[in-house]
Image (cartoon, rainbow, N blue to C red):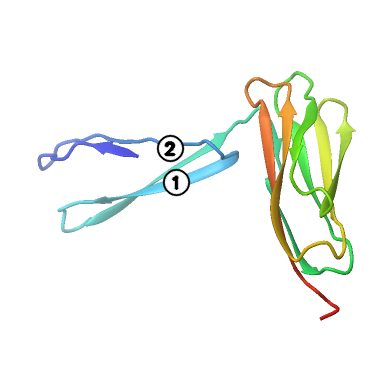
Amino acid sequence: MAQFDRVIPPGGEGKITLKVHTKGYQGTVQKSARVRTNDPNHKQLLLRVKGTVKVAVHVSTRYIHFHGNDDQPLTRETEVRAELERPLELTPLEFTLDGKVTYAIEEIEKGRKYRIRFTTVPGTALDYRGQLKLETNYPEKPEITIYIAGRFRNKSK
């Protein structure tokens, strides 16, 4: 979102305010805005904003995708890491793909780092979408949702 002075006299100064909404982002974020002017030498300027979004909990990927033949199990992983100084606890809240995908939560570093491994169940479905919701003990990030999608070919056809 941008706010700016609409008219700036020749040789004068103006103000441009850019607001970046960071919900859903983590790590380095870059955004840009184009500024159009009536200056014949600089008809358009590009403003870049770069920053680091610090989060309470870092998730390496929130999207797990499976694709291939449906006759063998496939495995994908994501890591969840505490970014605050206090221990992180994860508790499963909801899993919508029972019978199609299994998951296991492994504590890699006590109270700091977890690995979540998802494995497909062969021959159960051709296409699906679902999610794993985890509750945390952090009020700053009380819930994490990991989205899972599968698209398979039936090898026997």
Crowding around mark 2 (Cα neighbors within 10 Å: few <14, some 14 to 19, many 20+) is some
Q: Give the x, y percent position of residue 64.
A: 72, 52
Q: How many marks can you see?
A: 2
In screen coordinates, is 27 left or right of 138?
left
Q: Residue furthest left?
A: 9
> Circle 1 — which element?
strand
Q: Give the x, y percent position of residue 17.
A: 31, 34
Q: Name the residue tied to disc 2.
A: 20
Q: Amino acid at mark 1?
A: Lys
Does any portion of residue 58 appear in the rendered image? yes
Does any portion of residue 118 appear in the rendered image? no
Q: Amino acid at mark 2?
A: Val
In screen coordinates, is 51 left or right of 55?
left
Q: Give the x, y percent position of residue 144.
A: 68, 35
> Circle 2 — which element?
loop
> Is the residue 92 above or below the residue 68 in the image?
above
Q: Alpha carbon of mark 1 to alpha carbon of mark 2: how far?
A: 8 Å
Residue drawn at x 10%, y 43% as measured from the top left: 10
Q: Name the residue tied to disc 1.
A: 31
Q: Residue furthest bottom?
A: 157
Residue drawn at x 87%, y 63% as measured from the top left: 122
In terms of image quadrants, where is residue 49? top left
Crowding around mark 1 (Cα neighbors within 10 Å: few <14, some 14 to 19, many 20+) is few
Q: On the rendered image, what quadrant is the C terminus found in?
A: bottom right
> Is the residue 34 above or below the residue 122 in the image?
above
- Closer to the camera in the image, 90 or 150: 150
Residue drawn at x 74%, y 20% as measured from the top left: 85
Residue drawn at x 76%, y 18% as measured from the top left: 86
Question: Which numbered circle lies on residue 150?
Answer: none
- Closer to the camera in the image, 45 or 3: 3
In terms of image quadrants, where is residue 8? top left
Q: Given contact means CB atoms under 8 Å apart, are the residues at marks 1 and 2 in contact?
A: yes
